[in-house]
Each structure stands twice: as structure tokens, then as C-alpha cells.
Image: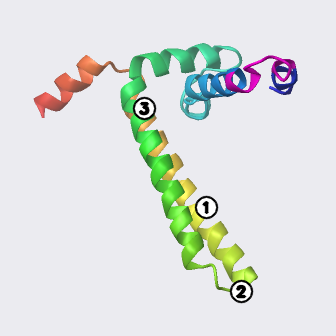
Amino acid sequence: MRVAAMGLASVANGALIYLLLRLGLYILLNAVPELIYQSRTSGLELIGASYNFIVENWLEWLIPNLLFAVAGYFLLDMLQSLIFSLPAYLELFLNALFLGLGLAYFMTFRGFLFSELHGTTRRSRMYRYDAR
């Protein structure tokens, strides 16, 4: 990414191209952590498996992740405004505590969502839920 940033620095719209490159990689490689610990895929196969997973489940995967990220941003912003006047050591402790709790919940949610979506199709999930 540093080489790409340095190479695109001299291009007219280099910052925009670099932003789009980072955004594309973030979207395509979003499922890599779950693929690492929940599947037997390793090495360069992870990139292809992540791409296939995102292509098959983009709506069910990216929308909840985006909503959780936005909600987490606003909750952390609200927390910052609530603990602003506290002593620095207490502020640091509460920041770390709530960030850790939020990240643990978010990553657990992602793990369960991935296990629900991986290996199924949209049609098979609809059939399974209608059968209940």
C-alpha cells in the first residue's frame, strides 16, 4: 500500500484512486478473519474464498457490518462526550473497557453471521426459514 501511495502521489487524481483501491480491498477482504478461524482455507486461497463469499453474500454481510460500524462510531463519540471531564487515568480506562467490550461483541456477531452464511445460498436460507 505504501508503494501504491507513493506511485499515485504524482498522478492527478492519485488520492481518489488510492482511496478507491483501499475501499475495494476492504470490501473484498472483509471476510478474511472469519475464513481464517472457521474454515480450512489458507494462503492465497483466502483471497479467492473471501471474494467468493462477498460476491455470494454481499447484502447479508456488508449491510449489518456497516450498521454496526456506524453505531459503534456514534456510541464511542457519545462515550467521549460523557467521560470528557473525568481524570485522565479513568478516561483512558473507560475508553479501553468500552472499546474492548464493543469489539468483542462486534467480532462475536461477525463470527455467528459468517457461520450462518458460509456454505449456504440465499435460496436455501429462504427455504429453511420458511419451513420453520
Give the mark nearer the N terminus: 2 vs 3.
3
Counting from the top left corner in percent of width and height, residue 52 is at 50, 14
Q: Kindly identify which residue carries mark 2.
A: 87
In the rendered structure, which segment of residues is drawn in magenta? 7-16
Confirm whether the magenta stretch covers residue 13: yes
Q: Which secondary structure, mark 3? A: helix
Q: Kindly identify which residue carries mark 1.
A: 100
Give the mark nearer the N terminus: 3 vs 1.
3
Q: What distance separates the C-alpha of mark 3 from that of mark 1?
A: 22 Å
Counting from the top left corner in percent of width and height, residue 25 is at 64, 24
On screen, 10 above or below 31? above
Q: Which secondary structure, mark 1? A: helix
Q: Which secondary structure, mark 2? A: loop
Asked if the residues shown at circle 3 and circle 1 are in contact, with their CB atoms under 8 angstroms apart, the answer is no
Give the mark nearer the N terminus: 2 vs 1.
2
Q: Kindly identify which residue carries mark 3.
A: 61
Counting from the top left corner in percent of width and height, residue 74 is at 49, 59
Look at discs 2 and 1 and give the one toward the viewer.
2
Q: Can you say which quadrant of the picture contains the N terminus?
A: top right
Viewer-side residue, 115 vs 89: 89
Q: Residue furthest front?
A: 12
Q: What's the amino acid at mark 3?
A: Trp
Q: What's the amino acid at mark 1?
A: Gly
Whether residue 13 is visible, yes or no, is yes
Q: What's the amino acid at mark 2?
A: Pro
Look at discs 2 and 3 and give the one toward the viewer.
2
Confirm whether the magenta stretch covers residue 53: no
